[in-house]
Image (spheres, rainbow, N blue to C red):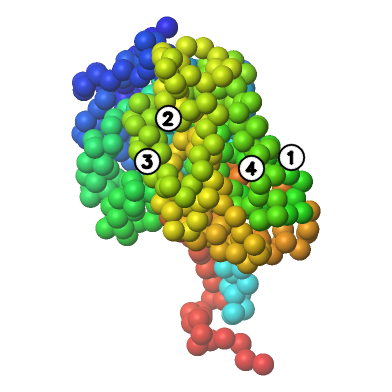
């Protein structure tokens, strides 16, 4: 089945624009969707529709908005298998991970449906008698949500669900490469009862989105931007928002380290490195970048890790593979460029080859026909030091660096020194090392004896440095992105009481 995707503004499909084909990266002959890409004007019109709808949506009591979120959760659950299959078909994520991704939406809805009954403010004592102070959470207004193809459903839900619950209206621009998944999720939200004027869908490329966003910000139509994607694009979004005195919610790249101490359970560490380094073909923002191994166990770790990678099954993502294709041909080209950063002092551990998997450069145990899709070999590059480009460049593909350290202090320095600060892991059986690592680590998310990926839907998610501007998604913490605090003071003294001047003296 071929989907037809187009922008939907206030419930009206927008027919004008250029057409792009969204293809199955495991089989490029399979056209998943015909996507009509909108121009900047459509983005602005979507923002206007969202602006007009916002006061009415905000008037609906939060517990009632929570019921809409509850219905969305149940609808997503009922359509879990179909949505997961669409994710696998459109972006090539292994089916088990796609099912996990859909479950993450259900978890997010389950968390926020209750938040509709909590959305607490506070009562605060005043410094004067007969006066009471209060705080309230108020919606920010119109939110523009721009999301990436690698988590085409779960990550958008991290924005859409709390934004809607808090009384905001939305312009959502999914990635062009996952347009059909975007359309399917928006349709479920409308069916759940989110008014079509409240959630507007814009299918557009990056250029049109920037132009549209710029204009909408200038016209005062957008109050908050949420963006998940590359650090480079995040910087541009941030500059644009900064001009309008706005701070966006940014979730950017990572070069996530995994530290293996000599006292670690090495089999566990190998399992964690395999899952976070090569799962989803390394195309998660939480994917493992470099493993730093204490010198005494380096050779042993590397040989077990190499064996695990050699035995891993790659190929057709609808089968039980560790990973499938890269999402797009451009990703493969960029990945091959990263392979040119391998230096003579590195040792490359590819199982049968490096770069693209083809009939001439095959991989043992590959499932499916490699020539039909965008498949690349898993690669381990040993000998990474702080001076290497591979130490600091996010590769967004199945490439894991390995480096060595002697002391714990060196490990911390290596784990922090690349500029990113999203996720970091340590494998150790020594509790003091674990706590010290957490304390000294720059990353927003730290794992002990677990991989760098696999965040749960109710813990704060986000990073520092090149990984973001400190904003956090998920759980109650994201409420600070989608609401603003308003205070109120209520004086019942029957006379003007002046703060600081009329304070009671003892
Ligand atoms: C992302 O890659 O943008 O922690 C998000 C994880 C997932 C989310 C990753 N739950 O791997």
For label 3, the SS is loop
Tell me which label, 4 or 1, sits earlier in the chain.
1
**Residue sitting at the far bottom:** 506
How far apart are the two marked residues, 2 and 3, measured between alpha carbons?
10 Å
Left or right: 386 with respect to 177?
A: right
Residue 399 is tagged as none
Question: Circle 4 sits on which residue?
Answer: 302
Query: Do labels 1 and 2 touch, CB within 8 Å?
Result: no
- When the figure is inspected, residue 476 is found, relative to residue 19, above or below; the finding is below
Q: Nearer the viewer, residue 314 or 233?
A: 314
Q: Is residue 10 visible?
A: no
Q: Position of residue 411 (x, y in %)?
A: 61, 60
Question: Circle 1 sits on which residue?
Answer: 267
Question: Circle 3 sits on which residue?
Answer: 340
Q: Residue at x 48, y 58 (%)?
A: 386
For label 4, the SS is helix
Q: Position of residue 250 (x, y in %)?
A: 43, 49
Tell me which label, 1 or 2, sits earlier in the chain.
1
Quadrant position of the N terminus in the picture = top left
Left or right: 399 with respect to 276?
A: left
Q: Nearer the viewer, residue 15 or 155?
A: 155
Q: Position of residue 83 (x, y in %)?
A: 53, 19
Number of other residues with Cα within 10 Å of mark 3, as a class: few under 14, some 14 to 19, many 20 or more:
few
How far apart are the two marked residues, 1 and 2, measured between alpha carbons?
27 Å
Quadrant position of the C terminus in the picture = bottom right
How far apart are the two marked residues, 4 and 1, measured between alpha carbons?
11 Å
Q: Position of residue 217 (x, y in %)?
A: 27, 48
Number of other residues with Cα within 10 Å of mark 2, as a class: few under 14, some 14 to 19, many 20 or more:
many
Query: Do labels 2 and 4 touch, CB within 8 Å?
Result: no
Residue 355 is tagged as 2
Query: Do labels 3 and 4 touch, CB within 8 Å?
Result: no
How far apart are the two marked residues, 3 and 1, measured between alpha carbons?
31 Å
């Amino acid at each position: 089945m071929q989907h037809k995707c187009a922008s939907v503004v206030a419930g009206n499909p927008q027919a004008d624009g250029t057409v792009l084909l969204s293809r199955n990266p495991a089989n490029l002959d399979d056209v998943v969707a015909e996507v009509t890409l909108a121009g900047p004007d459509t983005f602005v019109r979507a923002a206007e529709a969202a602006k007009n709808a916002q006061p009415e949506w905000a008037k609906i009591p939060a517990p009632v908005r929570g019921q809409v979120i509850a219905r969305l959760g149940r609808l997503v659950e009922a359509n879990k298998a179909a949505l997961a299959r669409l994710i696998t078909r459109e972006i090539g994520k292994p089916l088990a991970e796609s099912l996990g991704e859909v479950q993450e939406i259900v978890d997010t809805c389950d968390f926020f449906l209750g938040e509709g009954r909590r959305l607490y403010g506070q009562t605060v004592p005043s410094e004067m008698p007969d006066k009471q102070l209060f705080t309230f959470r108020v919606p920010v207004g119109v939110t523009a949500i721009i999301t990436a193809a690698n988590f085409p459903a779960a990550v958008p839900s991290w924005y859409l669900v709390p934004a809607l619950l808090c009384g905001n209206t939305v312009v959502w621009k999914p990635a062009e490469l996952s347009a059909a998944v975007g359309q399917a999720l928006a349709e479920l939200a409308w069916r759940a009862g989110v008014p079509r004027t409240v959630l507007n869908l814009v299918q557009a490329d990056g250029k049109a989105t920037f132009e549209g966003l710029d204009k909408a910000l200038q016209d005062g139509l957008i109050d908050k931007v949420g963006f998940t994607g590359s650090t480079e694009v995040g910087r541009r979004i941030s500059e644009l928002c900064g001009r309008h005195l706005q701070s966006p919610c940014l979730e950017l790249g990572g070069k996530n380290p995994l530290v293996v101490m000599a006292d670690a359970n090495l089999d566990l560490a190998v399992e964690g490195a395999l899952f976070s380094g090569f799962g989803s073909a390394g195309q998660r923002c939480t994917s493992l970048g470099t493993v730093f191994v204490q010198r005494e166990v380096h050779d042993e770790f590397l040989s077990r890790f190499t064996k695990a990678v050699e035995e891993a099954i790659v190929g057709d993502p609808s089968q039980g593979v560790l990973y499938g294709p890269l999402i797009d041909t451009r990703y493969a080209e960029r990945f091959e460029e990263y392979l040119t950063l391998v230096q003579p002092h590195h040792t490359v551990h590819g199982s049968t080859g490096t770069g693209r998997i083809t009939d001439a450069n095959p991989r043992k145990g590959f499932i499916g026909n490699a020539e039909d899709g965008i498949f690349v070999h898993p690669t381990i590059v040993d000998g990474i030091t702080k001076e290497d480009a591979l130490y600091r460049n996010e590769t967004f593909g199945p490439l894991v660096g390995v480096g060595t350290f002697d002391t714990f202090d060196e490990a911390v320095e290596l784990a922090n020194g690349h500029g990113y600060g999203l996720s970091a892991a340590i494998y150790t059986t020594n509790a003091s090392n674990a706590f010290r690592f957490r304390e000294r680590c720059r990353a927003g998310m730290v794992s002990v004896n677990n991989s760098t990926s696999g965040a749960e839907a109710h813990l704060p998610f986000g990073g520092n440095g090149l990984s973001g501007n400190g904003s956090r998604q998920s759980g109650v913490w994201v409420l600070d992105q989608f609401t603003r605090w308003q205070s109120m003071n209520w004086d019942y003294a029957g006379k003007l009481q002046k703060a600081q001047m009329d304070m009671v003296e003892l």
